[in-house]
C-alpha cells in the first residue's frame, strides 16, 4: 500500500510502491478510483487515473491489485457498449444514473445470465491452447467458441453439456502437473497482444461496397488503413459505412475522444440497420467502445488497447474482424497530455518521442494469422484508423507517423466534401499498397480485365487533373475533341461512379460485380466515343447522347437486376454507330 505525494489532473504520484510492477492496476483514495501504473522510479509510482481526481490529495492511500489492466472475454460481449476500460455503459447508468459515479465497479460480462454450452470436444481428447472445447450460440449470427486458454495443454478429463453462467466450470483439463477448471470466461491483459502461430501475407480484399475504396484503393483482409482529413470531410461517416457494410464477421468500433453525438449516431443507427448478409440487426456482430471527448483523458488512451484485445479474441476463433478507431489523433493527444504531466522530454509539437512506436504497436496487432490450436484456423484483424490533423495539415506528427505504418491511405478532401461529393476520398493523393497482391484475386473472382479497367480509369482521372489547369486558363472550348471526351469520361467517373449516396437504400452499397459493370459501361462509352471521333463524328453529338443519362443512373440498379447493364451497353453501341451513318 502506498501514499499519494502529488496530484496533477489525471496523474498522481504515490510513494511506498516498491513491490509494484509496471502497468499494474491500482485503487486510489477512499473512493477506490481505478488507475494504472505508467512509470516507476525507486519506490515512487506515477499512476494515470481513469476517473475524475477531484478531492484526491497527498496522504490518500493507493492499493495495488497486482494485476495488469485486463478485459473479460466470453459470451455476452457481442452487442455490448463499453467505456474505455470495459465497463458496460448500460450497467453504469442503471447503477448511477446519467452521471457516472466515481469508483463505481461493474463487471464487464453478466455473471448471472445462463448460456447453453454445447461441447465439441469429448473426454479423453488431447487439447492445446486455442483448441475449441465447445461453443455458445450467442445470437443467430455469432457462434462463440469456448477455447482452451493459451499456454495450457493436456487431456480433457471432464466436459459437460448444459446451461451455465460464465463462471461455472464447463470442462476440466488434466495437465502434467494438475487438473485445471475451465470456465466460459477468460481474462486477458490489454497491452500485450494475444499469441498466435504465424502471420500470413494477405491475399484477398475486405470488400466494403464503397466504389472508390474497392476499385481504386482496396484494403486487404488483415490490412491496415488510415483515413486522414480535416474537420467536416466525412471521416466518421466513412468509418460508419465501413462498419455497416465491410466484409467482416465481427466489427469492433472504438469511439476514442470524438464528440458524443457521433457515438450517439452509431448507437441509434446500428440496432436499426439490417446486416445485408444475414438480415439480422447489425448490433448482433458489433462491439462498441465509447470513450468520448467528455470522458477522462486517461481512459481514452486505454480504449484503443481494449478494442484491439477484443478483436484478437474473435480473431482467435477464426473470424475476420474489422476494428475502427475514431480517432487515433485524439488518442495521441491523450498520450501527449500524460507525457507532459510526467515531465518527459517532448518531441515534435509536444507529442512524446515514443508516439511512432505506440502507433506501430497498435497497427501491428492487425493482420491475417494462423491462430493457436491443433487445427489449421485462419483469422484476421483489419484495422482502420481515422486521423484528425489540425487544419487538415498532413505534415503534423500523428499523420506522418501513421503514414509510415499503414499500407492504405484514404486522404479526404475538404474541397470534395464541401462540394457534397461523398465519399470525399481524393483520388489524386490516396493510395493502396495492396493492389498488386490483390490483382490475381480480382482477376479470378470479378473479371480478368478488372485490373486493366481500373488502371485506365485512374489514368483518365489523373489526365483530367492536368487538363483542368488548361481549362482554367483558356476554357474548355480550347481543348481538342479527344481531350473534351477525356474530360467528359472523367466527369462520369467522378459523378456517376465515385460519388456514392450513403443514405440511398440501393446506392449505399455496391457489390464488386455491380462495380465492374458500372466501370465497364463508362469505359465502353469512352472507347466507342474515341472510335467515332476517328471516323469523323462530331464531339458535341457524342457528348449529348441520350444514353448518358442511363449510364449516370446505373448506380441505382439493384443487385438482382444487373442484366440491365446489357441493355445500356446495347443502346450505347446503337447510338454511337448511328453517328457514323
Image: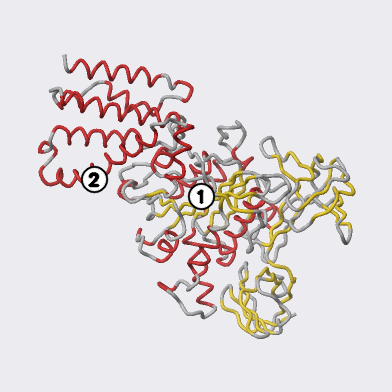
| Label 1 packing within 10 angstroms: few (<14), some (14-19), many (20+) | many
Q: State left or right for residue 563 relative to residue 366.
A: left
The percent position of residue 229, horizontal first and vertical second, equals 38, 54
Q: Nearer the viewer, residue 157 or 419?
A: 157
Dividing the image into 4 quarters, which one contains the C terminus?
top left
Whether 11 is drawn above or below 487: the answer is: below
The percent position of residue 255, horizontal first and vertical second, equals 54, 54
Whether 524 is drawn above or below 320: the answer is: above
Residue under label 2, please give it. 465
Q: Secondary structure at mark 1?
A: loop
Q: Measure the alpha-carbon separation of dots 2 and 1.
A: 29 Å
Q: What residue lies at 56% left-to-right and 54% top-to-bottom?
A: 366
Whether 195 is drawn above or below 493: the answer is: below
Q: State left or right for residue 297 relative to residue 147.
A: left
Dividing the image into 4 quarters, which one contains the N terminus?
bottom right
Whether 3 is drawn above or below 33: the answer is: below
Residue under label 1, please give it. 223
The percent position of residue 326, horizontal first and vertical second, equals 50, 54
Q: Are marks 2 and 1 in contact (CB under 8 Å)?
A: no
Q: What residue lies at 20% left-to-right and 46% top-to-bottom?
A: 466
Q: Nearer the viewer, residue 86 or 575?
A: 575
Amino acid at each position: 500500500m502506498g501514499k499519494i505525494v502529488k496530484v496533477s489532473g489525471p496523474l498522481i504520484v504515490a510513494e511506498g510502491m516498491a513491490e509494484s510492477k509496471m502497468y499494474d492496476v491500482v485503487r486510489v483514495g477512499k473512493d477506490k478510483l481505478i488507475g494504472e501504473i505508467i512509470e516507476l522510479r525507486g519506490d515512487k509510482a506515477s499512476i494515470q487515473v481513469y476517473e475524475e481526481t477531484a478531492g484526491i490529495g497527498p496522504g490518500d492511500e493507493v492499493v495495488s491489485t497486482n494485476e495488469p489492466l485486463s478485459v473479460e472475454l466470453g459470451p455476452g460481449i457481442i452487442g455490448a457498449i463499453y467505456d474505455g476500460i470495459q465497463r458496460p455503459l448500460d450497467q453504469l447508468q442503471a447503477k448511477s444514473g446519467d452521471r457516472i459515479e466515481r469508483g463505481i465497479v461493474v463487471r464487464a460480462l453478466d455473471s448471472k445470465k445462463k448460456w447453453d454450452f454445447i461441447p465439441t470436444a469429448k473426454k479423453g481428447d488431447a487439447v492445446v491452447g486455442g483448441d475449441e472445447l465447445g461453443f455458445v450460440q450467442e445470437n443467430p449470427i455469432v457462434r462463440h467458441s469456448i477455447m482452451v486458454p493459451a499456454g495450457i495443454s493436456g487431456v480433457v478429463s471432464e466436459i459437460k453439456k448444459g446451461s451455465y453462467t460464465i463462471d461455472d466450470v464447463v470442462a476440466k483439463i488434466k495437465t502434467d502437473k494438475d487438473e485445471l477448471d475451465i470456465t466460459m470466461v477468460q481474462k486477458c491483459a490489454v497491452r500485450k497482444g494475444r499469441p498466435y502461430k504465424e502471420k500470413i501475407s494477405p491475399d484477398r480484399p475486405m470488400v466494403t461496397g464503397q466504389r472508390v475504396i474497392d476499385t481504386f484503393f482496396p484494403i486487404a483482409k488483415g490490412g491496415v488503413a488510415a483515413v486522414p482529413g480535416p474537420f467536416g470531410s466525412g471521416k466518421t461517416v466513412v468509418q460508419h459505412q465501413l462498419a455497416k457494410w465491410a466484409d467482416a464477421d465481427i466489427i469492433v468500433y472504438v469511439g476514442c475522444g470524438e464528440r458524443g453525438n457521433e457515438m450517439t449516431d452509431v448507437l441509434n443507427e446500428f440496432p436499426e440497420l439490417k446486416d445485408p448478409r444475414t438480415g439480422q440487426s447489425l448490433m448482433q456482430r458489433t462491439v462498441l467502445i465509447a470513450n468520448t471527448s467528455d470522458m477522462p483523458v486517461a481512459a481514452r488512451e486505454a480504449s484503443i488497447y481494449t478494442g484491439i484485445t477484443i478483436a484478437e479474441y474473435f480473431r482467435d476463433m477464426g473470424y475476420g474482424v474489422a476494428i475502427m478507431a475514431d480517432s487515433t489523433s485524439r488518442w495521441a493527444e491523450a498520450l501527449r497530455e500524460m507525457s507532459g504531466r510526467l515531465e518527459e522530454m517532448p518531441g515534435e509539437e509536444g507529442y512524446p518521442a515514443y508516439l511512432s512506436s505506440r502507433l506501430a504497436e497498435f497497427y501491428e496487432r492487425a493482420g491475417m494469422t494462423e491462430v493457436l490450436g491443433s487445427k489449421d484456423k485462419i483469422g484476421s484483424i483489419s484495422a482502420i484508423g481515422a486521423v484528425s490533423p489540425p487544419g487538415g495539415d498532413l505534415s503534423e506528427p500523428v499523420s506522418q507517423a501513421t503514414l509510415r505504418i499503414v499500407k492504405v491511405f484514404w486522404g479526404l478532401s475538404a474541397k470534395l466534401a464541401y462540394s457534397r461529393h461523398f465519399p470525399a476520398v481524393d483520388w489524386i493523393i490516396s493510395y493502396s499498397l495492396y493492389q498488386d497482391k490483390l490483382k490475381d484475386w480480382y482477376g479470378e473472382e470479378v473479371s480478368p480485365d478488372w485490373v486493366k479497367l481500373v488502371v485506365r480509369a485512374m489514368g483518365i482521372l489523373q489526365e483530367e487533373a492536368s487538363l483542368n489547369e488548361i481549362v482554367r486558363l483558356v476554357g474548355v472550348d480550347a481543348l481538342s475533341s479527344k481531350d473534351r471526351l477525356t474530360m467528359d469520361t472523367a466527369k462520369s467517373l467522378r459523378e456517376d461512379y465515385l460519388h456514392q449516396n450513403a443514405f440511398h437504400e440501393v446506392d449505399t452499397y455496391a457489390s464488386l460485380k455491380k462495380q465492374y459493370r458500372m466501370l465497364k459501361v463508362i469505359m465502353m462509352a469512352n472507347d466507342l466515343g474515341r472510335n467515332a471521333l476517328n471516323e469523323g463524328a462530331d464531339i458535341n453529338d457524342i457528348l449529348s447522347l441520350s444514353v448518358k443519362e442511363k449510364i449516370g443512373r446505373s448506380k441505382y440498379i439493384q443487385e438482382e437486376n444487373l442484366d440491365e447493364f446489357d441493355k445500356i451497353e446495347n443502346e450505347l453501341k446503337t447510338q454511337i454507330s448511328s453517328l457514323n451513318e
